[in-house]
Image (cartoon, rainbow, N blue to C red):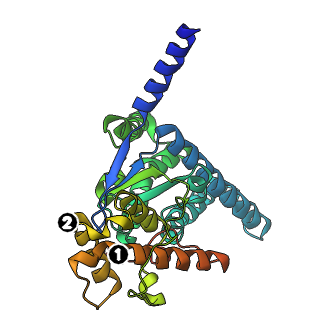
Amino acid sequence: MSGRATTASAAARRAQNKRRWFAITPPEGVPVRFEIATIAARFGAQLADVGLTVAASFALTILLALLPFNLDDATLVVFFLLMLAIRAPYYIASELFWNGQTLGKKSVRLRVLSADGRGLSTHSVVIRNLMKEVEVFVPGSMLLSGQSLGWFWGTVLLVWIAIVLGVPLLNRQRLRIGDIIANTIVVHDPKPELLPDLTDGAGDEAFVFSAAQLEHYGRFELQTLETLLRRHPLSDADKAPDPSIVAVTQQICTKIGYEEPVPDSRALAFLHAFYKAQRAFLESRQVFGDVRDDKHHSQPDTDGES
């Protein structure tokens, strides 16, 4: 019996060691850890997205064939052109408007993040997805559709595809070339669950926040603040102010435009009051069907600014 337990424990340790983590430090200064997406999960997401674009291209090709056009000799070329016309805009638009996710990524709970902790910019999303065309899709399409490439160029394309597919296997963060150039990383998207309520007895009526100020943050930032406040309960407010608490307070005040001065001795009370107001605000927004994942929700074109 003990042998089985030892084997199970060893297997669990091996599985844990295979998981890789990436820490992002946003401008607020509190590090957030994400699990780096596995190769298998990324392949599954990619397979789902490719399946969607292939199905859409196939449907449009059939529709064009039903029109009074002679596509007999160009059907395959039209199909691959439609694939290109649909695929690139699909990936770019999805990741911009769905907070770093495509339908495929949503299905396996993956998400693209900016590696510097800031919001995904339009530039980063466009670069990483256009590089995907250069890395795999265009060479793959040429191999599938080009009958006159010859053995030399066919071999060159196969070697190129093998190299770019091998790049994520050779770096710890599993980045492909497009991620390296765009400074992005693909992570497992944690289920956004708020920790047990901290608001009972928390807060300070001296601190009042407007809706415009509470619009700046989402659930992920609130989770980060929860983690910090659990290490610094409101009962510690009478103690000497912690430098990290003061720094986070200053960051939040600057970000939301809170103009009233907050003494260092009141920094912890301010954070608890902000947490209470922010949580209530997000919960009310969810009731009315407007859920904010993070501070960059519905702000795709931030040009890397936070």
Question: Residue 259's image quarter?
Answer: bottom left
Q: Name the residue under label 1.
A: 269
Q: Of tags 2 and 1, which is closer to the observer? A: 1
Taking the image as shown, residue 58 lies to the left or right of residue 182, namely right
Mark 1 residue element: helix
Q: Position of residue 28 (x, y in %)?
A: 30, 69
Foreground residue among 136 and 190: 190
| Residue at (35, 70) in percent of width and height | 123
The location of residue 162, given as percent across then percent down, is 40, 35
Circle 1: is it few (<14), some (14-19), or many (20+) Cα within 10 Å? many
Q: x, y percentage for residue 175?
A: 36, 46
Where disc 2 sits, the SS reads helix
Q: Is residue 275 above or below residue 73?
A: below
In the image, residue 199 sits, relative to residue 193, either above or below, namely below
Q: In which quarter of the image is the C terminus?
A: bottom left
**Count of numbered tags:** 2
> 194 or 42: nearer the eye?
194
Give percent across and percent down for residue 41.
Answer: 53, 42
Q: Is residue 66 left or right of residue 166?
A: right
Q: Distance between the residues labelled 2 and 1?
A: 14 Å
Which residue is the site of mark 2? 243
Q: Is residue 12 above or below residue 181?
A: above
> Residue 125's mark?
none
Q: Is residue 64 visible?
A: yes
Could one spot residue 147 in this view of the protein? no
Mark 2 vs 1: CB contact within 8 A: no
